[in-house]
Amino acid sequence: AKAKGMGDVVVTMTFSADAITDVTLDLSNETDTIGQAAGDTLKAALLEKQSADIDAVSGATITSKAIKEAVTDALSQAK
């Protein structure tokens, strides 16, 4: 799923029958020291929470919101 951050943010998710098993974040269009730097933290939060209901990373609010939007879209496609 894709959403607009500073540039396009692409989220690819893998699911088992009842869980998110992997998340790939393409943040190549985001600022390298801000949005891209937040990628690992955001991925870990998504896997821990098993939903788009994650906290934004301070300083990377636009990227965080775009990831949450794309994850919400991916989850709706998976249902």
Image (spheres, grey):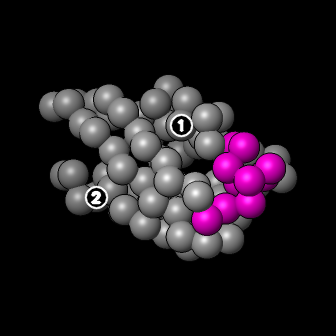
- Asked if labels 1 and 2 touch by Cβ distance under 8 angstroms, the answer is no
The image shows residue 51 at horizontal and vertical percentages of: 44, 41
Picture quarter with the N terminus = bottom left
Task: Name the N-terminal-most of marks 2 and 1.
Answer: 1
- Viewed as shown, does residue 7 lie left or right of 77? right
Say which of marks 2 and 1 sits in front: 1
Q: Most prominent secondary structure in the magenta stretch? A: loop
Which label sits on residue 76? 2
Percent across and percent down for residue 58 are: 81, 47
Q: Amino acid at mark 2?
A: Ser
Residue name at image x 74 percent, y 60 percent: 31
Residue 39 is situated, as x and y percent measured from the top left of the image, at: 62, 43
Q: Which residues are magenta?
A: 29-38
Q: CA distance from mark 2 to mark 1?
A: 18 Å
Q: Identity of the amino acid at label 1?
A: Lys
Q: Secondary structure at mark 2?
A: helix
Few, some or many C-alpha atoms within 10 Å of disc 2 (few <14, some 14-19, many ≥20)? few
Residue 60 appears left or right of 71: right
Say above or below: 47 vs 33: above
The residue closer to the viewer here, 29 or 18, is 29
Q: Which residue is mark 1?
A: 43
Q: Is residue 71 above or below residue 50?
A: below
